[in-house]
Amino acid sequence: ILVKAEPDELYHLAGQSHVGASFDIPETTCQFTAMGTLKLLEIVRDLATPPKFLHISSSEIFGKPDQSPQDETTPMRPVTPYGVAKAFATQMVTLYRESFGLFACNAICYNHESPRRGESFVTRKISRAAAAISLGYQDELLLGDIDGRRDWGFAPEYVEAMWRMLQQPAADDYVLATGESNSVRDFLDAAFSAAGLDWQNYVKKDDRYRRPAEVSRLLGNASKSKDILGWHAETRLPKIAELMVQSDLHAIQSEAGSQSN
């Protein structure tokens, strides 16, 4: 496909990206997320005219960092199978850039959300539940640790930053983040408020959703992206949650309408 298409730019966003699931399927996670990236790099290296290559890395590579916020120089200390796989892929991208001269970049993305987020991820699970409860289709929401904190941004803005990386004269790695830390509790507040509800009336804790190991203090410093790419995150958590709930409200109502017909 790449030989026939001869692309100028290749954006590699694929992988087994569910952190919780990576504990249940570590081999699959490493095959897709780690080895999949290496295989793509090998293909690109063998092309007559290698395209510019963008790999979407993750804040999970930092795991339990000694410093906060983290930047491009922060040591990798992953604590999940997904984080380990992403650390491997990230370092391979750097290796191919430095050893083989590929124009290869790592976009080290902190959590990025949108209405397209899969329903197994906590943010979409929350937005979908808030919408469903407000419409009378659901009674409660089961969650694990709601005090866990993340740096949540808006996915479309992060994709723009990825494009900007490949427009630079030289390849490099960049952290993409908001620089703001919010808890799952904060996301609950924003999402249920957008649906006109108080989450404390509907949310119950379930230890089945707790992870064997949890990252901590993941907060990104995107100053390099701002200085070089002219990029910064604009949309913050309350607005992201509102957009996701509105989208789920519309989707659930549409599903109910189609079923009744």
Image (cartoon, helix red, strand yellow):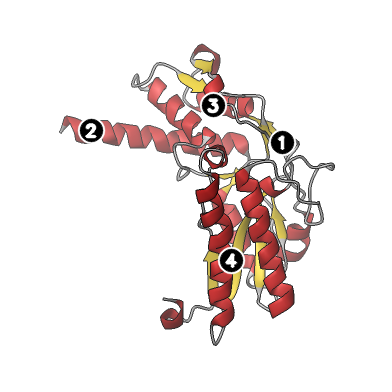
Mark nearer the N terminus (2 vs 4): 4
Query: Marks 2 and 4: which is nearer the front?
Result: 4
What is the distance, in whole Å, between disc 3 and disc 4 at their CAs? 31 Å
Whether residues under marks 3 and 4 lie with C-beta atoms below 8 angstroms apart, the answer is no
Query: Marks 3 and 2: which is nearer the front?
Result: 3
Residue annotated with mark 4: 38
Residue 231 picture quarter:
bottom right
Residue annotated with mark 1: 181
Residue annotated with mark 3: 209
Q: Position of residue 30 (x, y in %)?
A: 56, 53
Mark nearer the N terminus (4 vs 1): 4
User: Considering the numbered disc 1 on the image, is that residue within a helix, a strand or a loop?
Assistant: loop
Residue annotated with mark 2: 257
Give the class, few, some or many, for how many residues have Cα within 10 Å of label 1's Cα (few <14, many ≥20).
some
Mark nearer the N terminus (1 vs 2): 1
Give the residue type at disc 3: Tyr
Q: Which mark is residue 83?
A: none
Give the class, few, some or many, for how many residues have Cα within 10 Å of label 2's Cα (few <14, many ≥20).
few
User: Considering the numbered disc 2 on the image, is that residue within a helix, a strand or a loop?
Assistant: helix
User: Considering the numbered disc 4 on the image, is that residue within a helix, a strand or a loop?
Assistant: helix
Give the residue type at disc 1: Ser
